[in-house]
Amino acid sequence: AQTVTQSQPEMSVQEAETVTLSCTYDTSESDYYLFWYKQPPSRQMILVIRQEAYKQQNATENRFSVNFQKAAKSFSLKISDSQLGDAAMYFCALAKAAGNKLTFGGGTRVLVKP
Amino acid sequence: EAQVTQNPRYLITVTGKKLTVTCSQNMNHEYMSWYRQDPGLGLRQIYYSMNVEVTDKGDVPEGYKVSRKEKRNFPLILESPSPNQTSLYFCASSSHRGRVPDTEAFFGQGTRLTVV
């Protein structure tokens, strides 16, 4: 069975500052993908960033980057230059590389202070 | 526009009154699934379908039914809703062919269900 754990229920960040969200996971698969999803108040699920487990290089999408530590089974998300629009719930998720099911963590709410 | 459409977006019902939440996708995806989202628990898979007439249980199937008579539609049925089924529900679809990101999930807008 796969599990994903997000230990921070809520994080607060000042606008323009940086915040890091942590995520740990467990899987017996050797080939898998990790994701961060953003859920704003509209409830829409928005894919923020994706990391292939076989790639050592950390994924980056504009102001969003990850720190993928495969041996430690850790997958943190860094949001740089935080903006008011970044305020949302963020979910870490895991999927087998050739599968369709997503296993989610419990979520971290990010508050951005102006 | 590629999309997954869920209806209704909000629903308040009473215990025991059968209801159906509809889900439709226009991307010809084989794989469809239902998730429920609860505070602190994230999203958990209820049921999934790998193709027409093929459905199977996810992690939290109790109290739910699904059907897949057509490829585009995957309704979620609560035959006798109870208050512990009060939750936010998401339908998702993806291609079953290949690997991520080809199998990336598309989510519906969510259905907020309250059972009183």
Image: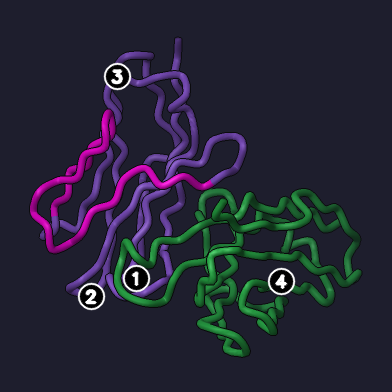
Chain colours: A purple, B green
Residue range highlighted in magenta: A45-69
Query: Mark 1 sits on what residue?
Result: A2
Which one is closest to the eye, mark 2 or mark 3? 3
Residue B14 shown left or right of residue A89 in the figure: right
Residue A95 shown left or right of residue B37 in the figure: left
Residue shown at 82%/77% (left/top)? B79
Residue at mark 3 to residue at mark 4: CA–CA distance: 41 Å
Which one is closest to the eye, mark 1 or mark 3? 3
Secondary structure type for disc 1: loop
Which residue is most to the top?
Answer: A114
Secondary structure type for disc 3: loop
Residue at mark 2 to residue at mark 4: CA–CA distance: 30 Å
Which chain letter goes with mark 2?
A
Which one is closest to the eye, mark 2 or mark 4? 4
Mark 2 Cα-neighbour bin, 10 Å: few <14, some 14–19, many ≥20? few
Residue at mark 1 to residue at mark 4: CA–CA distance: 25 Å
Residue A13 belongs to the span the image colors magenta: no
> What amino acid is labelled 1 in the image?
Gln
Secondary structure type for disc 4: strand
The quadrant holding residue A66 is: top left
Query: Mark 3 sits on what residue?
Result: A81
> What amino acid is labelled 4 in the image?
Leu
Query: Mark 4 sits on what residue?
Result: B76
Label 1 near label 2: C-beta < 8 Å? yes
Which is more N-terminal, label 3 or label 1? 1
Q: Do labels 2 and 4 share a chain?
A: no
Label ID, residue A29 = 2
Label 4 near label 1: C-beta < 8 Å? no
